[in-house]
Amino acid sequence: MKNSVLTFRKKKQEGRKITVLTSYDYTMAKLVNDAGVDAILVGDSLGNVMLGYEDTVSVTMDDMVCHCRAVARAADHAMVVVDMPFMSYQVSVEETLHNAGRLMKEGRANAVKLEGGTRVCPQIHAMVEAGIPVMAHLGLTPQSINAFGGYKVVGKTKETAEKLLAEALAVQEAGAFSLVLECVPMKLATLISQKLEIPVIGIGSGAGCDGQVLVAQDMLGMTSGFSAKFLKVFAPVGEVIKTAVSDYIHEVENGTYPAEEHTFSIDDEILEKLY
């Protein structure tokens, strides 16, 4: 049975952790889905992971629709949540509804995610009223990296911690079914998780959250040049791939691949007629 917002709510009520991983294509999504993850996030981090951008700002609606549609084809169990890219929801409520509608209809998403607190509550409310489940995102919000001036932990002072809690309560009141907290001090993230009725999914925010999300390629060691304190590499898949490619190159160059068992035969009498 496919997971939904009810799965998130039930797991929080029962004290069971929620698991979320990113995927951006059919092949990875199929593996992640079949492994039993609760939800797949088609994140705008695809800008970094799949398209080679330095940040997520350049990702377009067409990018998100295309990648989400591929992931949705593979997810018969996991709930599919898709990021609304930069400037797809900041202009107006009407434009937000149009873009979210595209992600649901064309991308076949089950829910959308957007960054921000109080300032996006009207958009959250409007989408929920239109029947679109919304996951909120607070703390470090990568689309605002130029305003932040870098990747930083959020909520370390009394003022910023109070603001973060207030905004978490605001997005819940606006109708968000869950909240991502990114790079928030562990004790603060735990407190927010306890105060909210909706599930809180952490990334770099400690084990006190109701669930966790990671970029699949990061936790598989497939992204070079990226490291973070919160990241654990669960399998060195990147090194395995590089070794396999190196072995392939070597065998092709020295003529050991393809071997006879990798080829197809033809009757010699047919060949003789060709000479």
Image (cartoon, rainbow, N blue to C red):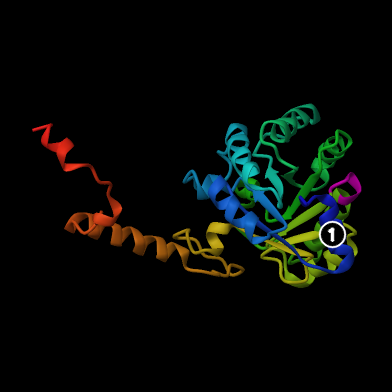
Query: Does the segment drawn in magenta span residue 174?
Result: yes
Q: Looking at this view, is 36 or 156 the one in front?
A: 36
**In terms of image quadrants, where is residue 120?**
top right
Q: Looking at this view, is 81 or 252 the one in front?
A: 252
User: Which amino acid is tagged 1?
Assistant: Leu
Q: 26 above or below 179?
A: above
Local crowd at mark 1 within 10 Å, few (<14), some, or many (≥20)? many
Residue 156: x percent and y percent? 73, 67
Please give the name of the residue rendered at 72% of the width and 57% of the height, measured from the top-left corner. 38
Q: 33 above or below 97?
A: below
Query: Does the segment drawn in magenta span residue 251?
Result: no
Please give the name of the residue rendered at 61% of the width and 49% of the height, measured from the top-left corner. 145
Residue 208: x percent and y percent? 78, 71
- Tag 1's secondary structure? helix
Number of marks: 1
Q: Which residue is mark 1?
A: 165
Q: Is residue 192 left or right of residue 229?
A: right
- Identify the magenta region: 172-176
Please give the name of the residue rendered at 12% of the width and 32% of the height, measured from the top-left corner. 273
Q: 105 above or below 211?
A: above
Quarter placement of the C terminus: top left
Q: Does the magenta stretch mainly form a helix, a strand or a loop?
A: helix
Q: Residue furthest left?
A: 275
Residue 137: x percent and y percent? 74, 51
Residue 10: x percent and y percent? 87, 60
Q: Looking at this view, is 40 or 170 the one in front?
A: 40
Q: 219 above or below 171?
A: below
Q: Examine the rendering and report whether any part of residue 55 can be seen.
A: no
Q: Examine the rendering and report whether any part of residue 219 can be seen.
A: yes
Q: Residue furthest front?
A: 269
